[in-house]
Image (cartoon, helix red, strand yellow):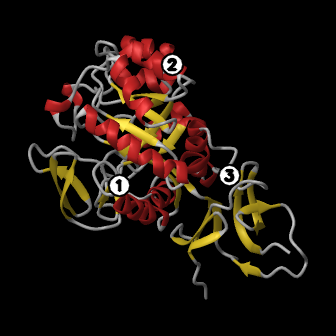
Amino acid sequence: MADHKVLAGARVVLPTGIADNGRVIVEGGRIAGHAPADAPALDLTGHWVVPGFVDMHNHGGGGASFTSGTMEEVLRGVHTHRLHGTTTVVASTVTGDMDFLAHRAGELSELAQQGDIAGIHFEGPFISPCRKGAHSEGLLRDPDPAEVRKLVDAAHGHARMVTLATELPGGIDSVRLLAEHGVIAAIGHTDATYEQTVEAIDAGATVATHLFNAMPALGHRAPGPIAALLEDERVTVELINDGTHLHPAALELAFHHAGPGRVAFITDAMDAAGFGDGTYHLGPLEVQVLDGVARLVEGGSIAGSTLTLDTAFKRAATVDGLPVESIVRAVSANPAKLLGVYDRVGSLEPGKDADLVVLDAGFTLVGVMRKGEWVVEPRLG
């Protein structure tokens, strides 16, 4: 008889709503519909059970960089985020030399093939020098479709997203190429106008890379990319909910206009996530992390985050006052759908992977399960 685990008594967030005094049945590595009457149950009364988190934009953690670390270090970074509830993670790279990025994509594709990561996201080098943020300006380039295709091909079918400044020469053609190959074209680190952004969306762009950050501010006569990205039903907007990248009013604005079905919480995490303050590198650039905030040593630009998604979830519930169902969509279901993995993860339904997070009544993480095995086993009582 297959091994069964029964999680009982919690408030369980399902696609259909919240089940009070709910039960989640795990059989092997998957969620099951039924369990034997004598299957042991873990009493989670007073807790929440939510789907495992899905992070589609993450550069590292645990002291490890997804761009430059060894494969062993990358796995350490992945595990660091699993400890914080992220059971599915996409490895994001930062701007670098094209040959290096292509080689890196090949290495990371092996981890994707093994199921350790959910694919690769290229953030740069096809971004605007006007909005480069923590990217090396000397390595930036226009989005030539042939070079975009080089990176996609180097990922051996595991490229999931490319962030582009679509107003640059070749930007629109690159969006079309990505759409044709089933890769998400994300608008970000952009100096585009409202009209240029609309053109890119019409060409097939479907994601806003960390909305509000690294793009022109919303203006009443020149609304810029933010208005175009928020108003279009075809676009999902990434938000970094760490209290540093966004004012709570900006978060509320995004949720109000995009709705809970078009928001994806991301970390945009760098090496220091889950590791601590100190000096790090993001690509070739030196970063100082102080009180959990990462900034470039030269120039002071925010350089990614040290966020983990359990913190983003708790902040959304306790500071921003968002409904739990909306938070779950933003942190699990929406990114899973975008990545094409919603058939396996992103919600608690029979047949899907048993990826889940246990939170206490105050939304602090106390347990993480991935594919039926405890990564963090709840210590109750």
Q: What residue type is labelled 1?
A: Gly
Circle 1/circle 3 CB separation < 8 Å: no
> Along the line of sight, which residue is nearer the eye, 362 or 1?
1
Q: Is mark 3 on a helix, strand or loop?
A: loop
Callout 2 environment at 10 Å: few (<14), some (14 to 19), or many (20+)? many
Residue at image coords 37%, 12%: 196
Name the residue beneath numbered marker 3: 347
Q: In this view, does 253 lie to the left or right of 47?
A: left
Q: What residue type is labelled 3?
A: Ser
Image-quadrant location for residue 292 = bottom left
Circle 2/circle 1 CB separation < 8 Å: no
> Along the line of sight, which residue is nearer the eye, 164 or 101?
101
Name the residue beneath numbered marker 2: 204
Residue 25's spot in the image, x, y percent?
A: 78, 67
Residue at image coords 41%, 59%: 308
Image-quadrant location for residue 7 = bottom right
Q: How many numbered discs, if any?
A: 3
Residue at image coords 44%, 30%: 153
Among numbered discs 1 and 3, the one appearing first in the sequence:
1
Q: What element carries label 1?
A: strand
Say the numbered circle drawn on residue 60.
1
The N terminus lies in which quarter of the figure? bottom right
Q: What residue type is labelled 2?
A: Gly
> Along the line of sight, which residue is nearer the eye, 182 or 166?
182
Disc 1 to disc 3, C-alpha distance: 24 Å
Q: Is residue 240 left or right of residue 168?
A: right
The C terminus lies in which quarter of the figure? bottom right
